[in-house]
Structures are given as C-alpha cells and as structure tokens.
Amino acid sequence: MDVPAYTPEDTEVPGGEIVVERASSPLEIGPKLNRTAADVVRFLMQQGEMVTATQSLTDDMIELFAAEVGAQVRLVDPGEEQEAELQKLLGFDESEGEVVDPSVEESWPLRPPVITVMGHVDHGKTKLLDQIRSANVVDGEAGGITQHIGAYQASHAGQVITFIDTPGHEAFTAMRARGATATDIVVLVVAADDGVMPQTIEAINHARSADVPIVVAVNKVDRDNADPQRVLQQLSEHELIPESWGGDVVTVELSALQNIGVDDLLDNLLIVSEVENLRADPSGRAKGVVLESHLDIGRGPVATVLVQSGTLNVGDPMVAGAAWGRVRALINEHGEKLNSAGPSAPVEVLGLSDVSEAGDEFVIAPSEKVASRVAGAREHWNRQSNLGRDSSATASGAKLEDIFEQIKAGETTTLNLILKADVNGSLEAVTESLRKLERDDVKLAFVHRGVGGITENDIQLASASNATILGFNVRPNRKARELSEVEQVEIRTYEIIYKLLEDIESAMLGMLAPEFEEVVTGEAEVREVFRVPRIGAVAGCLVQSGVITRGSRVRFLREGTVIWNGEVTSLKRFKDDAREVQAGYECGIGLSDFQDLKDGDIIETFEEREIERT
Ligand code: GDP
C-alpha cells in the first residue's frame, strides 16, 4: 500500500493572495492551489505528517504546502468572511450601520451606566457589591428574593446604575477577549490597610487597555492600620493621579463593611457617567452582550444578557453567539418576570437552544428562521476553527497535575475542562458539583460539555484549548485514545462522582494521587506470516527492541496506526514455546483472535506503570 512520493510539478498556482479557511482539508486546499488532494497528502507524508484527504489540517501544514508550491495564502477563521454576510442577513450591516450621526445620538435618552468592580483579592469587591445591592434595591422591587444572575441594578438619587456582579477580572477579560466591552466605568477597590497589590495593577491595565474610566474606592478605612494616603501615593506611581492631588482620578474613601462612604461612591459614579454622556436608542430590535450562561436542570439553557441598545421583548427571535431561540421569558435579579428590557438592563433569558459564552454578542433577528440559520452557521464554523486552531502535535492539553504549579505561582488559574457523561442528568450533576469546588484563585472553565463517549473531536478541542478531559461513565474510543497520546491530552475517566471531585480538588491542592501510564516494553516487526491449522495466523517476527513476553498486552500497528489491541497468546522460539524473547532474536507470535497479519506490521507490547509525581 505504498503511497507514491510527492513530486513537485510545474503547474501554475493561482497568483495573488488565496484565502484559505483554517482547518481546511487537503480535499479543500488542493484545488484552490491547482493541486489534487493526493498532492497535499503525499507532500505532508514526506514531511512526516500522516493525514487523510478529509482531515482538518493545522495552520502550519497549510502554510508548509503553500510555500512548497509557491502560493501565497491568507488563513482566515472559518466563518470570518461569512460573518459579514450573516450581519447583513440579520439586518445589521456593520460596514454601514456603525457610524451614527452625532445629532441623532444626542437625541437618544440617557441610559444607566454599567459598572464593573475590580481589584486585588480580599480587598472587598464582593462586600461592596453586596452592600450596594442590599441597600439600593430599585424602587418597587423590594421584597423579591435576590438572585445572583451576573448583574443587578441599583437605584441611587433617583437614578439607576447597573453593576456587573462577577467581581474580579474574569468577566471583564472574557468580554474583552471576544471583542465586547460591556463596562462604562471600572470601580477599582484598594484596601487601605494593604495598598496597591499585583491584581490592583492588573486591573488598572485592563481598564486602561479597554479605555474605560476608573473610579478608585479606597476600602476598609475603618481598620486601625488603614492608610488611605499611602494608597493614593501608590496609585500616583501608576499614573492614577487623584483629584485631590490635582489629577483627574476620582477617589472615594469607604468602608464596605460598615456601609460608610458607599453613597459617596455612588454619587461619584453618577457624576462620571454624566460626563461620559451615555446614551442609547431604546427603540428597535435589541442588541447586547451575554454576561454569563449556564444550563439549568429545570429551565434549560439560561443566559444573562446585558441589553445595550433597543428593547428586548418576550417572543423575540434571538441569536446569541451560536445559540438561538424565541425568548420564552425575561427574568430580573429579583426573580420577577418582565415583558421587556431596555438599554443597560441585565436580564436572564430563557428559551435559547444552547448555552452561549460570556462575551458573545446577542441580537434580535428579523425572524426565527434567520436566527436559526445564523446560529447554525456559527456553530459549524466554531467547531471548524476549534479543530484547526493550533491542533498541531506540539500543542497539548493541560495536565491536571500542572495546575498546582500555576496556583503556586500566584496567578489566578483557570482549569479548562471538557466534560463528557453518559446521560444529561449526570452531566448536570457533575457540572454543579464541580462548580462548587471553584475558588478565588482557581476557576473552572467548561470548554465543552456533552453526552456520549469521548471522541477525536473532544481530543482536538482539548488540545486546541489546553483542556483536561473528564469522562463520567464514558470512555474514549480507540481513535480518541490514540489521538490523545499524540496530542498529549489528559483523559480521566470515572464511575463514581466523589472520586472525580476528589481528584479535581486534590489537583487544586497539589495532591493528586498516582496515575498510571502505558509503557512500551517491546517491539517486534512481522517478517512472514504462517497459517497454522487450528491456531490460525502466526507472525514470524524479529524482536527489534525490548523484550516480548507471553501474556503481555499488545498493540498492533500498521503504518503507524494502531489497528488492534490484545494479548500475546502464543510465543515460540523455533518449535519451542518461549516465555520471553529478547531483542535481536526471531520468534513466532500468535495473537488471540487477531488474524489479519501482514509483513511489515509492528507488534508493540506494553504495560501499565505508576507515574512518579514530582
Ligand atoms: P473580595 O475578594 O475583593 O471580593 O473581598 P471580600 O468582599 O470577600 O472581602 C474580603 C474580606 O474583607 C471579608 O472578610 C470582608 O468582610 C472584609 N471586608 C470587606 N470590606 C471591608 C471593610 O470595609 N472593612 C473591613 N474591616 N473589612 C472589610
């Protein structure tokens, strides 16, 4: 089954820049460059990359081939080109729609400012958010049970302020990473007894890069060792010059714990937002951003969205990233059902087909049909680009045991997970339990969750997104396991939920129990195949390395691919049974029920060994 070598041809390649989607296959790329898929496959084989004609290629592979034939390619994310088309379909033509006549904008009503609270851990972000929420419930809504939906609105001096309720940098950076800015003003909390710390500086940088004004809340002034002046001094070293020192940064001293100065902070937020002149058109179809999204056992996919323009109504056909659906219900942070939500309002949306991602843009489509089409197209491209993006053999998934190193290094760490389970019920149960393990310094991000066995797609995705795969009552198929070895993706499978939770928790504490890995113990090449009556096929082999032992577990490889797994059932030196055969000797190997032996095949024996942890 020899593949003829690829020989460069003289056929002209199309001139100029050729647009190629990431993760295209040889079948797609070949014709674009005036070559056949086989040309691409052969060339890559020569480079040591075994690919099939329909397999998604990495950026490197595509560029390598393009260079080989002298073509100039530009790699684009799948869907990048089409996204503009989709925007047109949705009726939001980005090329025309964005620039608004200032006089028109000036005629729009003011909208509430949207605030994100950032700062170093333990400086009082949560306390401040809780304090504002409980003391400043929007009029007429008191009495409802307050829920954390990712954002809430507070009323102060007759005006409404929207707070993003996920303290820390996570939400903010997730938005930014996806090109969305949901925040108008950042409140930077600095504890007066602790001063400017690493995450304080991080927060300053985030706010600056997003070009969002900062209001400083010097917190914990009730503490004996509080030193607000020192905080201002430190801030000025980072070019945040307080107003009291002649600069332009608003600073407020407060105690979130004792509710001192919080009103003063709110006053100042209103002043800053007035300067910002925040306006939005409340008429027309709503548009905005997804703040967070999760799967609720009873209610299905739930997304908390922030409306940024227009008005969102129950019954509207919505697209949120790759999810879509007719809005079934809108619920505010007090658990009350609403009929509509206007600019700067955060609401939970029920009725979407799927969980969206924080930072996804949502829009109301002209019709349900358009909504479903747009979401479907995005879903397809997301999958494609996940496949292609850097899934080269060098990229690899994160190892659970490595997570502790990152935690120790003091960074806020995110453990990326792909979770597969046998049924929806267990998927939800495991997810919920895992969520409870989250700490301030270790977050869990579910790159993908799904029902069913662990597949090659999961491995590709894990590799591209640096994730660990957890299987609950499911296992990887053979191909997936093989790919996981190549891509160095860690797969952990469990049958008992507490074992799973225990492992993740231990990983966070740097105390993972030993793990087992397969170690190759011997390798033999098939030289000749004999048919023995009643026994079947026996492989005449030369042991090339290690030692082949009767009863050991084997993998059967053909052209580098595992085609069978099993056991060495018979082992002979000449006519005699042998217990083991060393490298350099010939032997006859029989493999239980496997008959399809061919010259040149490789028999690899392996065993499981405990991996030492460092
Ligand atoms: P976060 O990590 O920034 O969200 O910080 P938290 O809001 O969880 O606060 C950390 C700790 O500081 C908690 O024990 C709070 O009760 C306490 N704390 C927060 N604000 C104040 C304050 O103004 N004064 C005092 N004395 N303690 C505070």
Image (spheres, grey):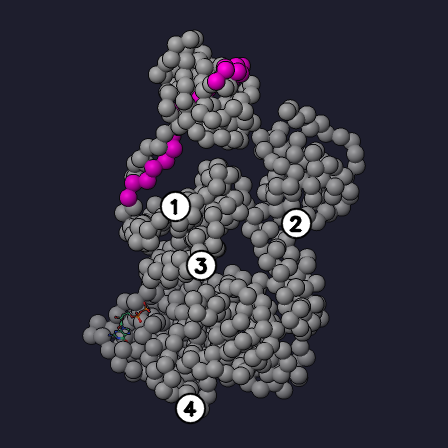
Kindly state the secondary structure of the residue where label 2 is placed.
strand
> Which residue is found at the position 38% from the left and 15% from the top?
581
- Residue 220 appears in the picture as rendered: yes
Query: Which three-letter amino acid code belongs to the residue tagged 3?
Result: Asn
Alpha carbon distance from label 3 to label 1: 19 Å
Q: Nearer the viewer, residue 204 or 137?
A: 137
Quadrant for residue 115, please give it: bottom left
Up/down of 76 relative to 395, above or below: below
Quarter of the image where the N terminus is located: top right
Question: How far, Cα to Cα, is label 4 from label 1?
Answer: 50 Å
Q: Could you tell me residue 263's position as x and y percent?
A: 36, 85
Numbered marks: total: 4
Question: Dividing the image into 4 quarters, which one contains the C terminus?
Answer: top left
Q: Which residue is mark 1?
A: 492
Say the numbered circle drawn on residue 323. Answer: none
Q: Residue tagged by mark 3?
A: 424
Q: Nearer the viewer, mark 4 or mark 1?
A: 1
Indicate yes or no: mark 1 CB to ligand 1 under 8 Å: no
The vertical placement of 601 against 89, above or below, is: above
Give the magenta range: 513-534
Type of amino acid under label 2: Glu
Pointer 2 or 3: first along the chain: 2
Quote the CA–CA distance across marks 4 and 3.
39 Å
Circle 1 packing at 10 Å, graded few (<14), some (14-19), many (20+), is some
The residue under label 4 is 140
Mark 4 or 2: in front is 4
Of helix, strand and loop, which one carries label 3? helix
